[in-house]
Every structure is written in structure tokens, then in C-alpha cells.
Image (spheres, grey):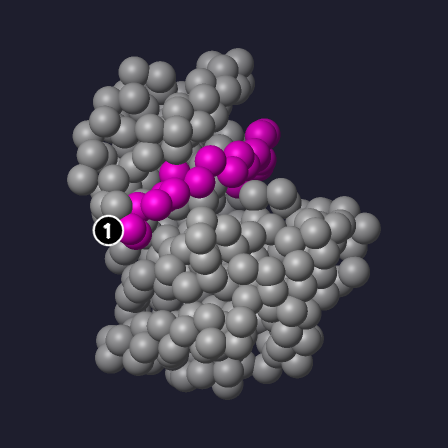
Amino acid sequence: MTRVAAVDCGTNSIRLLVADADPATGELKQLDRRMTIVRLGQGVDRTGRLAPEALERTFAACRQYAGVIRELGARRTRFVATSASRDAENREEFVRGVVDILGVEPEVITGDQEAEFSFTGATKELAGLDHVEKPYLVVDIGGGSTEFVVGDVSVRAARSVDIGCVRMTERHLVRDGHVTDPPEPGRIDAVRTDVEAALDLVEQTVPLTEARTLVGLAGSVTTVAGIALGLPAYDSDAIHHARIPVDRVREITATLLSSTHEERAAIPVMHPGRVDVIASGALALLAIMERTGAREVVVSEHDILDGIAWSLVPESR
């Protein structure tokens, strides 16, 4: 067993996983997994810079995570930063802050690397499930970008496009500094148009319709799953490997797009940091399912974070 710590810093959230990894069995025993909404990508699409308040929120979470890593005694730590920090002009300020707090330099990975980590984390344990066929299409709907990767044992093709739930919300659903509740039809159409254009780009290099199983990752997908399951509170065990039909995703998306902030916030599984961006995320998931012809999405709570953790185990590289 190797005790490792993985940090995934995205556009909307920063997450930590401390786990014992056993390459001989393929088991990743979770010791601590947590998520903090920091909205690092606040305004990046518009300004090209990380906002001071967004950086401070992120650094505060890093200080908390550093304490957990020390307490649990992880031998190796890897910090991966994704879409927002790729796009920001002042990303060096972000890098310096993370090094000062955690003692490791954040790796601002490419979209293809992000997709590979997501694929590994999401699919490593799928082989043991009944009625889950290869090849897989793994879709990771993040805050700033969405990754698409097709593969079976390994990655065959991958593409990252800028249609994350935060980016789409800020670009199309914000008016006078506030998210429109509910958004006007024209604004919804604008989100859908951007998603469809991105899917056109993805299809140039990723064979979306060849996959036999669609695997959905990240907060937008898991939140939709929690709603579909009617959970009284967020339950990772119940959501992990749930299968949600496309018709149910369509119903939930329509409800979210016609709801007010207060109505979305009252949904039992809704994290407060997702209230304003969940409609865009659900709409992206629906568009992907309709484009690929997927009858259902297999939801995974294991994702890029688990892939980062496995990358720290020499025998699994």
C-alpha cells in the first residue's frame, strides 16, 4: 500500500483525496475525500485573470487540506490545476500561493491530460460490473471545461472543450451581475448553441457514437443523479454507479431551467455552490446524451481525483 494525497483544483471547486493505493489488487482505499466550492474561475472568461477574492478562497481551502494531509501522513502529494488556471494571465500568483501552503507545485495540465486522469479514475473498477460494455465514453463536465474520452483499457481519443457549467452560466445566463431566474428562452438557446458547437469540435477527433457505455463525472452529473434518485440528502454511495435514463435527465433539466434560485436551493441534494450553475451543467449533459444516442448515463463518484491518486503509485503509471 502507498498512502497518497491528490488535489484537483478546478474552475468551481477544489477537492482532496487521501487514500491507500494497492496496485496489486487495483484497490484505492479512501481515507478522506472532501470538496470545497471556491469558484476559482470567477470572471476568468471575461477578464482573463484570477480574481483576488477567488485566489484567497482557494488558498484558504489549501490551508485546510494541508492540515489533513499532514495528519494522515500521505507519502506523496500531487496537485493538479485545470481549466481556470490554464486560462489566467496571473496563474503564477496562484502557483506561488499553492507552493507556499502545500509545498508542492500545482501542475497546470492540458485538457488531454485531464481527460486521461478522468478516464483512469472513472473506469478502473467498471470491469467488475454487470451489463457495462466497452468501449466507454467518459464525460467530465467541469466548471470551465468538459472532457470527452473514449477508450476501453486505455484512452483511444480525447478532447477538452470550453463548455463548463460556470463558463456557460457566466457567458449566457448572467444579466446585470446576477443569474437570471429562470433564464429566458433565448439565453437557454445560447447555452445549447455553444454546447452543440463544442460537440461538433469533439466529433472531429473523438468517435462519440462508438462507445457502448456513457460514464458521467463531476458535480453537475452527480447532482442530477441525486435528484433523479429522489435522495433526501447527498449520498455518494447511492449515487456511485447509478444509471439515469435520458428521459429522466430531460425532465430534470427542464425543471432546473424553469426554476428560481430559491427553488433550486431547496433541492435536498443541491450543494449551495452549485445552485446558480446546475442548470447549465444539466443542459450540457442532456445535449451530450442526445448527440451520442445514449439511453442512460452511468454516474461515477470516482473521477479525475482518483486518476491523480493512481498516478502517484509507481507500479500503476
Dot 1 amino acid type? Thr
State the quadrant of the C terminus: top left
Drawn side of residue 72 relative to residue 131, left or right? left
- Above/below status of 171 relative to 68: below
In percent of the image, x 56 and y 63: which residue is there?
Answer: 279
Q: Residues within 10 Å of mark 1 (few under 14, many from 20)?
A: some
Residue 126 shows up from this direction: no
In percent of the image, x 50 and y 51: which residue is there?
Answer: 178
Toward the viewer: 137 or 292? Answer: 292
Q: Mark 1 points at which residue?
A: 110
Please tell me in which quadrant of the rendered image residue 53 appears: top left
| Farthest residue, direction front | 176
Drawn side of residue 260 relative to residue 186, left or right? right
Secondary structure beneath dot 1 equals loop
Q: Residue 288 in magenta?
A: no
Measured from the top left, where is residue 62 in percent x and y?
43, 24
Measured from the top left, where is residue 129 in percent x and y?
62, 65
In percent of the image, x 41 and y 55: which residue is there?
Answer: 170
- Above/below status of 190 relative to 105: below
Which span is picked out in magenta? 28-46
In percent of the image, x 72 and y 56: which residue is there?
Answer: 263
Drawn side of residue 213 relative to residue 182, left or right? left
- Above/below status of 287 relative to 12: below
Q: Residue 34 in magenta?
A: yes
Measured from the top left, where is residue 244 in percent x and y?
66, 70
- Above/below status of 23 relative to 101: below
Residue 231 shows up from this direction: yes
- How many numbered dots are placed on residues in this image? 1
